């Protein structure tokens, strides 16, 4: 859920707290509410979307595709655009290339939600940098429609996880520092 104002979020939090504290109101409901903590939360399983039900989770990949000499990094699925495809089609292909075509996503807009201009570090391998100064990375907001990650499609040298905003920010900060972590924090 995307909040248009902080006031709406505060009102939702107030009512959710009110309902959870008022046991007589809960007892009068014609159903039994499901617990918000799942088995995946209890076991720490980050390979399922059935976790952290109180917040959003994002598909993240741990990949060495960014040319980092210090090892794989956590990031979002990405791909280089082909001449005959739109940026949105590139984003969709990036997800299917990374985790298979069983996971179906819906994109509410053709416009990217964010862009990051990355200047290449001279320490990056020459075969990665080529003759380029840097790159522009466009981020699209997509939402889960149906399906799941096809684990057999995930490359052996990569890993995936469904991470919350805080988990993703923490992993990025450990790998790339506070500046990049702040970028992810505000983007998500």
Image (spheres, rainbow, N blue to C red):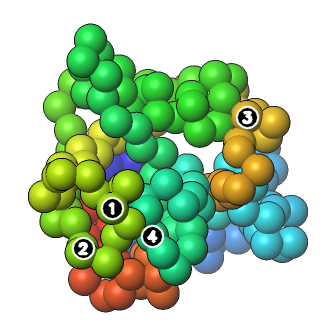
Q: What residue is rendered at 43% in x and 62% in y?
A: 67
Which mark is in front, 4 or 1?
A: 1
Residue at 52%, 80% in the rendered image: 70
Question: Residue 38 placed where, x, y %?
Answer: 80, 61
- Nearest to viewer (mark 1 / mark 2): 1
The mark nearer the N terminus, 4 or 2, is 4
Q: CA distance from mark 1 to mark 2?
A: 10 Å
Q: Residues within 10 Å of mark 4 (few under 14, many from 20)?
A: some
Which residue is labeled 1 in the image?
Answer: 126
Label number found at residue 121: 2
- Are there few (<14), some (14-19), or many (20+) residues within 10 Å of tag 2? few
Do residues under tags 3 and 4 come within 8 Å of each other at their CB atoms?
no
Which numbered disc, 3 or 2, marks the residue that appears first in the sequence? 2
User: Residue at image x 30%, y 40%?
Assistant: 140
Residue 43, image x, y percentages: 86, 72
Q: Which mark is residue 175?
A: none
Q: Which residue is mark 3?
A: 153
Is 115 situated left or right of 78 in this image?
left
Residue 68's disc is 4
Tell me the distance, in whole angstroms, between the alpha carbons under discs 4 and 2: 10 Å
């Amino acid at each position: 859920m995307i909040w248009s104002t902080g006031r709406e979020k505060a009102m939702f939090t107030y009512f959710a707290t009110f309902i959870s504290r008022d046991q007589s109101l809960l007892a009068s409901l014609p159903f039994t509410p499901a617990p918000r903590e799942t088995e995946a939360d209890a076991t720490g399983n980050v390979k399922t979307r059935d976790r952290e039900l109180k917040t959003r989770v994002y598909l993240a990949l741990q990949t060495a595709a960014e040319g980092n000499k210090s090892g794989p990094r956590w990031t979002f699925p990405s791909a280089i655009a082909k001449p005959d495809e739109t940026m949105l089609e590139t984003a969709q292909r990036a997800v299917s290339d990374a985790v298979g075509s069983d996971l179906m996503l819906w994109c509410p807009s053709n416009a990217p939600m964010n862009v990051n201009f990355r200047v290449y570090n001279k320490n990056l391998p020459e075969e990665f940098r080529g003759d380029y100064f840097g790159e522009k990375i466009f981020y699209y907001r997509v939402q889960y429609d149906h399906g799941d990650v096809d684990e057999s499609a995930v490359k052996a040298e990569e890993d995936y996880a469904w991470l919350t905003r805080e988990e993703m920010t923490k992993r990025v900060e450990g790998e790339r520092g506070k500046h990049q972590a702040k970028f992810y924090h505000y983007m998500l």
